[in-house]
Image (cartoon, rainbow, N blue to C red):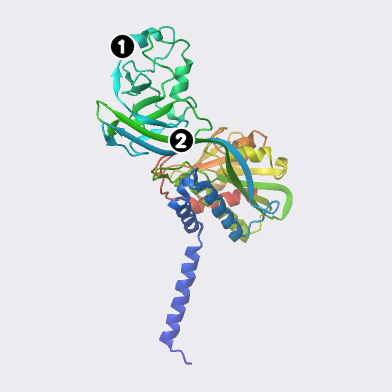
Amino acid sequence: MRITKSGFLIIISLLVFFSISFSIAQTPKVYAEQVIKKLTSSEFSGRGYVDDGMKKASEEIASQFEKIGILKFQNSYFQPFTYPINIIEKSSVSVNGKELKFGSDYLVGAGSPSLQGDFSPITFNASVIESLFESQDFSYFNKEMKRIDKNCVIFPNKVFPENMTMQDKTANELYHDIPQLISNGELDISAPLIIQLTSSKFIHSLSPIQTKTVDLFINSQSVPETITSVSLDINTRFEPNFEAKNVIGFIKGKRSDSLIVLTAHYDHLGKINDVIFPGANDNASGIALLLSMAKVYKQNTPDFDTVFIAFAGEEAGLKGSQYFVDHSLFDLNKIKFLLNFDIVGTGEEGIQVVNGKEFYKQFNKLENISYMYNYLKQVKIRGSACNSDHCPFYEKGVPSFYIYTLGGKSGYHDIYDKEVSLYAFDKLIALLTKFINAL
């Protein structure tokens, strides 16, 4: 068959087009977008404790390990373990007959038990509270409180510090700190419902215990100033031995006398009713970076054996990483360096390096590489902080960084963490691979 000049040019153009298309499809950022879209989809129910969300996510990550060609420890990618968790399975709250939406109008405290019923506020004398606090420093309590049906207390205004939802103590525990009772019984410290109206940003969390009190946080803009009735139907389940799995594998390097370890957690806050906490930045982005690094090292043999760990249970208190450190599949002393990725979906303002001050020589190397190649706007240094999965390793003396990105827009522990820019993603991979090679 004879090919004309014009036909030849068309064929060349098509070959160039498909070559470019293939190249674009294989960039780390494009792959990361696919991973994040998958993990934040309704199929995985927020990678939490209902609808087998966390289990499905672990199986998806193991499937990606298999496709990439990551090797198994002890013939399995999985390291199973258990831990206690309080699971909110269903929640319905109405104020003055108006049904509120979970996640935007209200949150239920992570340790809350089940509670159903209709309640009406009753005002009681604030002087009783004043007499109770005479010898105690509870100045952050608002004196204008209302009481519901002799058993429940509603706080019409913000009465706890702004970061109350981030503290370990629940409202119920604060009441139990009070060393005396009110003699006339107007305030029952075993009240099963405590409500806080707040204008602060909602931050959901998890709890490894179940308290005796339902803590309800309501957006003050979602309800009228005067509350006449509250209806609840909250169902929770305490699971003392929730079954989870770390996902672990490795790629053989040129040397096996030392290890490079890369980690990220894959769990998030799950699903309540039909509301999903998608966790795009926290931490589908970290898993996307972990898998992307694995793809890089599968194509380019690393200097040292490189281990990849996707942890479960981070949001419940670093459960997966702590279990691994206590039941390690290899000698922790062999770890040359560990990099933990958690919330790496932006990067417009660069990155933050936790433990940078503790391992300044390595930090200086990372910063210099970024500056030399103009990768990131800044590489900020920070001291030690036990705020992600690097911590149990660091406490065992393992040299480690926890890296997260700065700038951009994303949610955090809320229903709005759906999308990330991945602004610095490709450059971050280039920076990290050069840094690891320079160790």
* Vertical relation: 132 (above or below) 423: above
What residue is disc 2 on? 236
Residue located 46% across and 33% down the image: 110
Answer whether residue 346 is visible to the viewer in this image: no
What residue is disc 1 on? 125
Looking at the image, which is closer to me, 267 or 341?
Answer: 267
Looking at the image, which is closer to me, 325 or 346?
Answer: 325
Three-letter residue code for mark 2: Thr
Three-letter residue code for mark 1: Asn
Residue 410's disc is none
Looking at the image, which is closer to me, 57 or 383?
Answer: 57
**Residue 431, position as x, y percentages in the image:** 55, 50
The crowding category of the residue bearing disc 1, from other C-alpha atoms within 10 Å (few below 14, some 14 to 19, many at least 20), is few
**Residue 11, position as x, y percentages in the image:** 45, 81
Element carrying mark 1:
loop
**Residue 280, position as x, y percentages in the image:** 45, 47
- In 3D space, how far apart are the residues under numbered discs 2 and 1 (Cα atoms)? 33 Å
Residue located 31% across and 11% down the image: 125
Element carrying mark 2:
strand
